[in-house]
């Protein structure tokens, strides 16, 4: 199981200065756009050796740090 | 049959609505299908075959994908152990992939062959002319059917959505045919999704006074934008862009600004007419615009302008390209050779390049459209590179960015950048773009009243201000139509009558005006 600290570290690398609370909205507030999300996907795939498919690229999987952590843990289990 | 023609507004819509309203509920989709096929046949004649075949391919693929899933479910329980079940699943997955690939290739292949083959052949021949050996290819020139770019991409979205499980396949052919041929969105979009549209399209709500008044008021607002603003601005724009060497820098700047106004008024006006038309029948089409000129960056502009094209390309091109195996390998390669930042950014930029080239070329087969896409790609990547650097060098920027003055500055900057894009988009080739930019060296030579008199300019200015005020109020969270609907009956109807009178009195039609074709219908 991965941790929130790992997710926040990657978010900070992808989007310098971004340090959200776990349930803070990221997409609707414009802190993450589609380009940031894809850079985040590349970073997550590399860091955690995940296979992300187009089906996983829904807004609901990226709208908070907690949602991203849930996605990573789910993909790691599959 | 044009959306702003008398026959469409007063005959077609009226007759189809009456049929639709008088039929029993279960037969209402038949009225919509009949209306759609009549609309397309009257407008595009024999090219209706393309729509019928695109619907057949999409429906066939959807049926096949569903059947494969059913077969898997039925056969799996009869198999003895996990290895056999896994092998069967792999086989079915491969067949499903083959189905979705074949359907997509057939639809996109037809689209590319009809729209781009002559351009590809011209480019190839021009390249070969510069080589020591001479090789020339000739290709047949197909006539592009009305709305090909729209119904082909919507057909692809249907197949992929069924494959991904985002929507259920339509059991009957006519249901897909109705979705693709639905007359309000087949000519200029929006790119609707079957999953979102089919519940109301196949099971429309009962006719209602509210749906009719809301639909009609939106159609009138769209007509105001098209007939009063866009067609009037077109006179000036056409003169400047058709004969650009004759005009000074100020005329070119005015022509470019007016083209931006024309395109916005026309395309968003068309969306108002088609969304209003669909609303008469209780069908909510996807929205294509969300106050684009209040954007602070060009990336945000494209999230507010032609929203459904951006969403289509993001979901069916940009994202699948990035998470594809070759791109993942490219990411690993970049990370190993150039560091972590390159590993996560460069594949995304490559995906952005592919997407922006697709956006450029979707608008037309020509090198100026390629440059148009490239222009936005470069702006967005420069933003991606320099924004973090600037924030690092100037930490106060993060605070300034939230001040109203900085937001206004960003909106003005975006407006200027978008206008440069519009110049590339409208000019007659790349040579003309350079000439028009060079004309800025001579800012002013003669009167700026080209093809339009002072009254026309006055109408355009008032129209643009009205557009701005409406967008400003929407941006501030107002819902103007709902707010108007809550006003007393007399006031409401006074506004409706005034709006119709404005269109009739100030519409750019008659002896001194040329009727302008819908711009996006040509894409």
Image: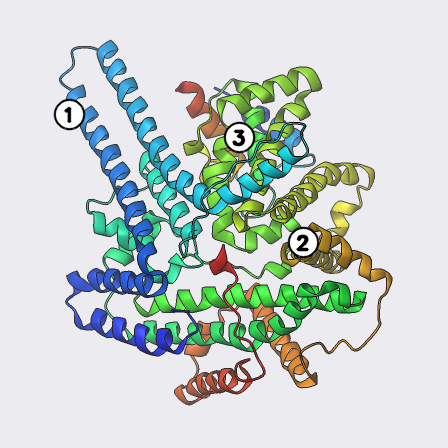
Q: Chain of mark 2?
A: B
Chain letter of the residue carrying label 3 = B
Q: Quadrant of the N terminus of chain B?
A: bottom left
Viewer-proximal residue, A29 or B213?
Answer: B213
Task: Of the two numbered discs 1 and 2 on the same chain, state the one appearing first in sequence.
Answer: 1
Q: Are marks 1 and 2 on the same chain?
A: yes
Q: Which label sits in the foreground, 1 or 2? A: 2
Horizontally, is B174 left or right of B429 in the view? Answer: left
The span from disc 1 to disc 2 (Cα, nearest Å) is 57 Å
Q: Which residue is mark 2?
A: B424
Quarter of the rendering containing residue B409: bottom right
Say which residue label 3 marks: B322
State which chain disc 1 sits on: B
Q: Which secondary structure lies at badge 3?
A: helix
- Residue pictured at 28% horizontal, 73% vertical: B208
Q: In front: A78, or B3?
A: B3
| Residue B189 sits above or below residue B127 on the image | below
């Amino acid at each position: 199981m991965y941790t929130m600290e790992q997710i926040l570290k990657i978010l900070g690398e992808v989007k310098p200065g971004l340090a959200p609370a776990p349930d803070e909205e990221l997409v609707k507030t414009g802190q993450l756009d589609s380009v940031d999300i894809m850079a985040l996907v590349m970073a997550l795939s590399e860091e955690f050796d995940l296979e992300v498919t187009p089906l996983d690229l829904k807004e609901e999987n990226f709208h908070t740090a907690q949602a991203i952590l849930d996605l990573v843990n789910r993909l790691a289990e599959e | 049959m044009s959306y702003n023609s008398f026959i469409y507004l007063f005959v077609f819509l009226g007759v189809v609505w009456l049929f639709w309203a008088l039929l029993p509920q279960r037969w209402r989709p038949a009225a919509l299908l009949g209306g759609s096929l009549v609309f397309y046949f009257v407008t595009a004649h024999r090219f209706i075959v393309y729509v019928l075949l695109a619907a057949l391919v999409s429906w066939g693929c959807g049926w096949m994908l569903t059947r494969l899933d059913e077969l898997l479910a039925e056969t799996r329980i009869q198999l003895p152990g996990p290895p056999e079940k896994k092998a069967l699943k792999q086989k079915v997955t491969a067949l499903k992939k083959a189905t979705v690939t074949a359907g997509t290739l057939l639809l996109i292949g037809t689209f590319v062959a009809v729209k781009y083959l002559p351009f590809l052949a011209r480019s190839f021949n021009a390249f070969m002319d510069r080589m020591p050996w001479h090789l020339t290819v000739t290709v047949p020139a197909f006539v592009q059917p009305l709305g090909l770019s729209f119904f082909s991409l919507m057909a692809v979205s249907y197949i992929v959505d069924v494959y991904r499980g985002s929507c259920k396949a339509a059991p009957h052919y006519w249901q897909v045919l109705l979705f693709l041929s639905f007359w309000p969105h087949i000519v200029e979009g929006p790119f609707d999704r079957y999953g979102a549209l089919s519940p109301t399209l196949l099971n429309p709500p009962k006719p209602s006074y509210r749906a009719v008044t809301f639909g009609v008021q939106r159609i009138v607002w769209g007509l105001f934008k098209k007939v009063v603003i866009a067609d009037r601005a077109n006179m000036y724009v056409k003169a400047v862009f058709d004969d650009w060497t004759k005009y000074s820098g100020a005329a070119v700047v005015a022509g470019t600004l007016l083209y931006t106004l024309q395109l916005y008024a026309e395309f968003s006006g068309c969306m108002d007419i088609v969304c209003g038309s669909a609303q008469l029948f209780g069908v909510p089409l996807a929205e294509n615009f969300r106050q684009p000129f209040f954007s602070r960056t060009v990336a945000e502009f494209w999230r507010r302008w032609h929203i459904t094209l951006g969403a289509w390309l993001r979901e069916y091109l940009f994202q699948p390209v990035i998470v594809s195996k070759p791109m993942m390998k490219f990411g690993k390669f970049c990370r190993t050779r150039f560091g972590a930042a390159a590993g996560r950014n460069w594949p995304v930029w490559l995906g952005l390049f592919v997407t922006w080239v697709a956006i450029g070329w979707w608008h037309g087969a020509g090198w100026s459209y390629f440059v148009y896409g490239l222009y936005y790609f470069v702006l967005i990547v420069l933003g991606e590179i320099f924004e973090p650097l600037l924030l690092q060098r100037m930490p106060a920027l993060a605070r300034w960015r939230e001040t109203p003055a900085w937001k206004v500055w960003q909106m003005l900057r975006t407006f200027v950048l978008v206008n440069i894009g519009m110049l590339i988009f409208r000019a007659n080739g790349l040579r003309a773009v350079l000439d028009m930019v060079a004309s800025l060296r001579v800012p002013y030579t003669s009167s700026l009243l080209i093809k339009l008199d002072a009254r026309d300019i006055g109408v355009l200015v008032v129209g643009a201000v009205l557009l701005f005020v409406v967008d400003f109020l929407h941006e501030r969270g107002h819902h103007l139509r709902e707010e108007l609907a809550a006003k007393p009956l007399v006031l409401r109807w006074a506004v409706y009558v005034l709006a119709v009178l404005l269109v009739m009195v100030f519409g750019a039609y008659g002896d001194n005006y040329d009727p302008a074709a819908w711009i996006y219908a040509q894409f």
